[in-house]
Amino acid sequence: MTAHARTSAAVVLVLAAAVTAGCAGSGSHSGSGPAPAPSSARADTGNSSGQNQAAPTESNPPGDIPDNQAFVTYRPTGGAFTGFTVKVPEGWASTVQGDTTVFTDKLNTIRITAASAASAPTTGSVTNTVVPQLRSQVPKFAAPKVSEVSRHAGRAVLLTYEGDSAKNPVTGKVVRDAFERYAFYRSGHEVDLTLSGPVNADNVDPWRIVSDSLAWR
């Protein structure tokens, strides 16, 4: 073989070796450390979607009584008449004013009054006597409506109306309230049950529980 031929063969061998080394390097990681993770694996190490984050706690609108509210039985122990019971929300603050017991919590109130009565209340007596009294007592009294309803304890006269609450001594705010006043009667005794809360509150179910729970004993 001539010198020129030997030189050409050497060049070919060198090029072939370089190509082989390049191919081997592209398929494996050379070095002492671990191979870097693919870009898709690196993206999965964080939680950018927020799927595991806790949802914010929701609160009831102002005046709404919670759906899980528990009720307890109230039994009057003094006053003109104690022959009845009624369920009230558990944990509400209570005050006694003569023959009247008041339960309150935030913006809601339950007022229970028992008294002797010569005759049962009627839609006419409530319209002619009770409505004028409340009109002079309740700020911005409005929209009175009188009807007869049936509850577990029997017939009752229902008066619904609206009025302003007393001014909050801390915030100075006044709330527009909706009222339901039930007048029950039995054997010379009348029990008036008044339920009140903000006009935009959804307390239909809790108020039904309370008004339907009155029982004579």
Image (tube, rainbow, N blue to C red):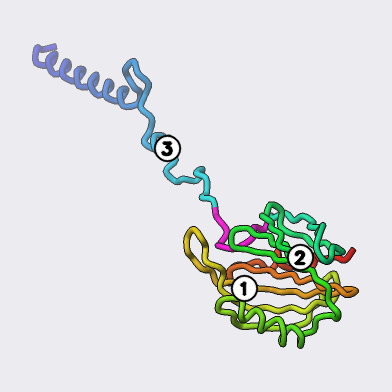
Q: CA distance from mark 1 to mark 3?
A: 52 Å
Q: Amino acid at mark 1?
A: Ala
Which residue is found at the position 62% from the left and 67% from the top? 197
Is residue 177 positioned above or below 43 on the image?
A: below
Q: Look at 55% across and 68% down and name the residue there.
A: 166
Of 100 and 194, nearer the camera is 100
On whether residue 62 falls in the magenta region, the answer is yes
Could you tell me what secondary structure mostly forms the magenta stretch?
loop
Tag shown at residue 99: 2
Q: Position of residue 44 (x, y in %)?
A: 43, 37
Q: Earlier in the sequence, mark 1 or mark 3?
A: 3
The location of residue 26, given as percent across then percent down, is 31, 27
Which amino acid is tagged 3? Gly
Q: Quadrant of residue 181?
A: bottom right
Q: Which residues are magenta?
A: 58-68
Q: Which residue is mark 3?
A: 46
Q: Which residue is mark 1?
A: 178
What is the C-alpha distance between the residues marked 2 and 1? 23 Å
Up the image or down, 29 lies above or below 138; here it is above
Figure quadrant of the N terminus: top left
Q: At x 85% / y 65%, what residue is drawn?
A: 215
